[in-house]
Amino acid sequence: MEVIIRDTREEAVSLTAAIIGKALREKPNLTLGLATGRTMESVYELLVRLYEDDGLDFSLARTFNLDEYVGLAPEDPNSYRYYMKKHLFDRVNIDPRNTHLLNGMAEDLYAECKRYESLICECNSIDLQLLGIGRTGHIGFNEPLSAMQSRTRPKMLTEETVAQNAAMFGGPDKMPRRALTMGVGTILECKRCILLVTGEEKAEVLARAVEGPVTSMISASALQLHPNCVVIVDQAAGSKLENQSYYRWIFENEPEWLSYQ
Ligand code: F6R
C-alpha cells in the first residue's frame, strides 16, 4: 500500500483522475471498477473534462460498479445506475452495453450476485478499482464484520451508513436498508485499487484503515493486504495519520509519482 497526501481536495481528486486517464490511454479496453458517492462526483467531472478536452477515449472500456441499493430501479434518481449515467456514462463515449451494475430489483438477489461475479471473471477481473470509504470504514457496502473473503452479496447497511446517505432520499425512513455489494474478497482480487478519501470527517476512520490492524471491523483495512493499492487523501483526511512525512517523502521521490508532479 502507498499513501499519497495532497494539500487540497482538488489536488487529490485531480491525481486520481490523472491515474485513471493514464491507465485508460495505456489500455483502451481497460476494465474499470467504479464507486459512487459525493467524493467521486468530482473525479467523474474531471474524467468528462479529459474526454471533452483531451480526447480520452472510453469506447472500448468496460466498467463494473461496486454496489447498488436493493429495491431501486435503474431509473430511480437515487439508484447508482442513475448516478453513473448522470455523472459519467451519458457524458462520455462509453458503450452502455459495457457498463455493468448489480440489479437491485432482481427477484433472486443471490443469483444476481453470482451472475455479477461470473461476469467479472469472464472479463479477466478488474484492472483498476476506484474506492471511497464510508464512516463505518466500509469499501463498497462492506459494513463492519464483512469477511475478508466475502464475495458479491446482499448486505444490511448500518444505522451510521443510513444516516450518512439519508439526506439524498429525503430522510432515513425512505432509504433502502440493504444493498448488493462486491465483497471484500472480490475487491482484493482487482489488479489495482485506488482509495480516494477527502475531508476531515474521514480522518479518524482513514487512520484506522491505513495504520491500524487489519480487521473486519474496518473493511478498508483489508486493502493493506492488496499488492497494488494506492490511498490518495487530502491534508484534511490525512490529518490523523502518524507517518505523514514518510508518505510525503515517498511521493516526492518515487519515480512513478514524479510524472504526476
Ligand atoms: C458507493 C461506495 C461507498 C462510498 C462511501 C463514501 O458506491 O462504494 O463505499 O464510496 O460510502 O461515500 P461518500 O463519498 O459519499 O462519502
Image (cartoon, rainbow, N blue to C red):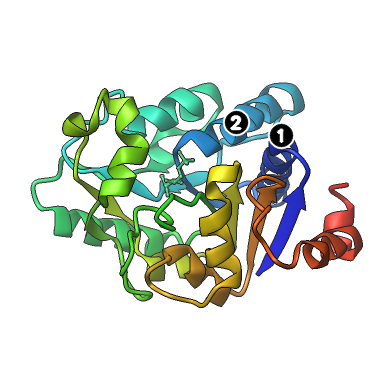
Residue at 68% over, 25% down: 49
Q: Is residue 176 left or right of residue 77?
A: left
Residue at 54% over, 38% down: 39
Mark 1, residue position:
10
- For ligand 1, the image quadrant comes to top left
- The x and y percentages for residue 58 are 58, 36
Residue at 61% over, 43% down: 198
Q: Is residue 201 left or right of residue 71?
A: right
- The x and y percentages for residue 201 are 53, 44
Instruction: Identify which residue, 238 or 65, lies in the foreground.
Output: 238
Spot the residue most to the left.
107
- The x and y percentages for residue 15 are 73, 44
Residue at 61% over, 71% down: 211
Report the Cα–Cα distance between label 1 and label 2.
8 Å
Q: Mark 1 falls on what kind of element?
A: helix
- The x and y percentages for residue 76 are 25, 25
Specify the amino acid type for callout 2.
Answer: Ser
Mark 2, residue position:
42
Q: Quadrant for the N terminus, please.
A: bottom right
Work out whether 228 lies above or below 203.
below
Q: Dots 1 and 2: beta carbons under 8 Å? A: yes
Q: Is mark 1 within 8 Å of ligand 1?
A: no
Work out whether 110 lies above or below 225.
above
